[in-house]
Image (tube, rainbow, N blue to C red):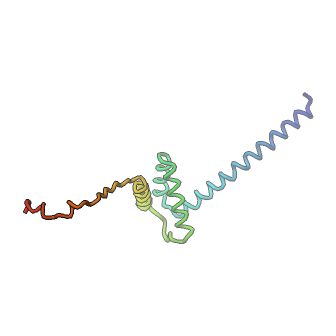
């Protein structure tokens, strides 16, 4: 290989790396934008709690972040949210998940001609 071919390969590889880092950079930019927005509406203790939840349950932490962002965008957040507010949101999400997973069984029995007779139960009086 001569130097011209080597330089062309290096230039092509550099363009590929810049293109791939540009795509990753946009996702990273969105993530840092979300992080900056959350920093504006969360107290440090609440931010710390959310980061600990993110280590254990990333899906639940994302749901809380999205919920907080919807609240902030609609103008319902008037003060910085504290750790107790995050706990309250997490408990609400847990209740909602539990309601989704909860099953109930309802027995409905057909009434027969014998069921209409209430006089049979008088011996308990």
Q: Residue at x 48, y 48 (%)?
A: 57
Please state the horizontal and vertical placement of residue 37, each as a whole percent of the image: 58, 61
Left or right: 60 as drawn, with respect to 16: left
Q: Quadrant of the N terminus?
A: top right
Q: Quadrant of the C terminus?
A: bottom left
Please state the horizontal and vertical placement of residue 80, each as a whole percent of the image: 49, 65
Name the residue furthest top.
Answer: 1
Please state the horizontal and vertical placement of residue 56, each as a whole percent of the image: 47, 46
Is residue 122 positioned above or below 58 on the image?
below
Judging depth in this view, the residue of 119 and 125 nearest the camera is: 119
Judging depth in this view, the residue of 98 and 113 nearest the camera is: 113
Please state the horizontal and vertical placement of residue 32, each as a whole percent of the image: 62, 55
Q: Residue at x 40, y 57 (%)?
A: 99
Name the residue furthest front.
Answer: 113
Counting labels gives: 0
Left or right: 121 as drawn, with respect to 101: left
Left or right: 6 as drawn, with respect to 75: right
Quarter holding residue 34: bottom right
Q: Residue at x 52, y 64 (%)?
A: 41
Judging depth in this view, the residue of 125 and 13 nearest the camera is: 125
Judging depth in this view, the residue of 71 and 3 nearest the camera is: 71
């Amino acid at each position: 290989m001569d130097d011209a071919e080597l330089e062309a390969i290096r230039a092509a590889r550099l363009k590929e790396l810049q293109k791939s880092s540009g795509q990753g950079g946009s996702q990273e930019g969105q993530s840092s934008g979300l992080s900056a927005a959350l920093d504006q509406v969360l107290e440090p203790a609440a931010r710390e709690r959310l980061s600990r939840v993110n280590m254990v349950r990333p899906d639940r932490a994302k749901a809380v972040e999205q919920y907080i962002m919807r609240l902030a965008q609609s103008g319902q957040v008037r003060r910085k949210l504290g750790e107790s507010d995050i706990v309250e949101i997490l408990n609400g999400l847990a209740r909602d998940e539990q309601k989704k997973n909860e099953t109930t069984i309802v027995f409905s029995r057909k009434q027969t001609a014998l069921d209409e007779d209430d006089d049979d139960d008088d011996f308990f009086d």
